[in-house]
Amino acid sequence: MTKDRIFDISSREIISRVPSSIQNAELFDCHMHTFDYECVPDNFFPKWLMSFAKNHLSVFIKIMKKLSRRWEDSKLKRMATFASAFNKTQLEILDSLYKEVNQKLGLKNMHYLILMMDMNFMDRGNCPKSLRTQLQELIQIRTMPKYQNLIYPFLAVDPRREIKESEPNLKLLPLFDDFKNDIFGLKLYCGLGYFPVGKCEGIDKLKRDLQQHPRKFNRFERKVAEEIIAESEIMDMVYKIANDRKLPIITHCGIYNAVYTNMPRRKMITKIKIGIKYLWDKHTFEEVGLVPSKRRFFQNFTRTHYWKKKRYLANFFFLPQNYRSVLKNYPNLKLCFGHFGGQDEWDRHFGHLPAKGRKHFFKPKQDWMLTIIELMREFDNAYADLAYNMCFTQLYADLNDLLSNTDIGDRILYATDYFFNEGEQSAFQYNQNIINRMKESMFLQIAQKNPKKFLFG
């Protein structure tokens, strides 16, 4: 039977084709989501569209899926994906996945690292459901017999929650104490508008310049610089807590994302300029194809990038180079690069696209995947997961080659990116595809051995 016909056979026959060693193994999906529409800001989509979607859900999903396939538009795919969760709670979303994978496919011991999202500070309005409530719901689900010791909540971290949230009960740091035994890791999504750095030389230099050379900054730039410093101080506290409690971190590191900040353009450009000036070294500039030595670099940077889409500008917050100081200054902290750079960067790395990529935003010399591989070789505490990428069959041979590399093969994690990957494949198809196309030993390595090392080691 050819692999193309795999979905024409019954689920019972498919289960019989999954090796018993995989069926009975303790497996881990290291990157998936269950947040519902109440975790999404009020203005994430136009209000009329949200209203129509809620009242005519099936029609809306059908229209969005048809349009997204025709135009290959990520925003339309995002609408369809979120719409599918409109009438579902976190428990119902998880139940759908459990039915597809644990029951229908027969992977009865599949565990899930549930990555929460905190979208309250992306400048698109407030989320109806608080981060605390989102976590409490997952904790309640974990007490159910079916999901006991099967799900592992990863708390979403945004340093601005600690700085801007007026309600003490809803700030970030108190969550670590109130739910000390219920948080198994942390999730970063820097494209919402912040840099991931904690304490580092660049932040120290920025502090000195603000004090000793105040004329370097106008009033607006000073305010933005002070925000960067304040956010780095919160991140430093977060990293210390994670280090002390041995909490692993998964950070989103994929290019061209559908979820990103709506920060005012002037502030976004200013924050990026200050960030890359103080947080990047010369090597980093060269990797991403920028030349910091030019005399009027930042004026030229503003002129070049000011009118680019915020979706592209947000990539500066996502760049893997931003984590070099984190990996260096917190050597005992396990950090996983979610999405391994993203499917576009995999295509660039393995030659499926031209060298410059399809939609590169500033002609980077080096693809994100290669940068992550170099960071993994430099730092033993760096990991990467495969979330979403394995929707695309041309990458399976490349994955097998990558896992054969002994330098990093023991730090690559199996992941699906459910429910975002539903626009490409069902959870059943995604998991079955990988099992069917990978060597059994390699699948067990990325879905069992490596995740246990990341989560518990």
Image (tube, rainbow, N blue to C red):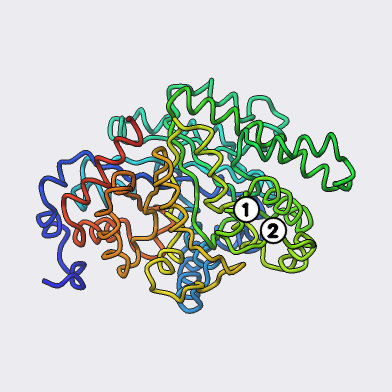
Looking at the picture, how far across and down is residue 163, in whole percent? 71, 33
Q: Is mark 2 in CB contact (under 8 Å) with mark 1?
A: yes
Q: Amino acid at mark 2?
A: Pro
The spot of residue 360 in percent (x, y) is 56, 69
Name the residue at 65% across, 60% down: 313
Between 45 and 446, the one nearer to me in the picture = 446
Numbered badge on residue 292 = 2
Task: Give how far apart the Cα atoms at labels 2 and 1 are.
Answer: 7 Å
Q: Is residue 259 visible?
A: yes
Q: Residues within 10 Å of mark 2 (few under 14, many from 20)?
A: some
Q: Secondary structure at mark 1?
A: helix
Badge 1: residue crowd in 10 Å (few <14, some 14–19, many ≥20): few
In this picture, residue 37 sits left or right of residue 206: left
Q: Quadrant of the N terminus?
A: bottom left
**Drawn side of residue 31 relative to residue 240, left or right:** left
Mark identifier at residue 282: 1
Number of callouts: 2
Point 33% across, 30% down: residue: 456
Which residue type does callout 1 highlight?
A: Lys
Residue toward you, 445 or 150: 445
Q: Is residue 178 left or right of residue 437?
A: right
Could you tell me which quadrant the C terminus lies in?
top left
Q: Residue at x 46, y 76 (%)?
A: 354
At mark 2, the secondary structure is loop
Instruction: Give me the residue at 11% from left, 59% from top.
Output: 13
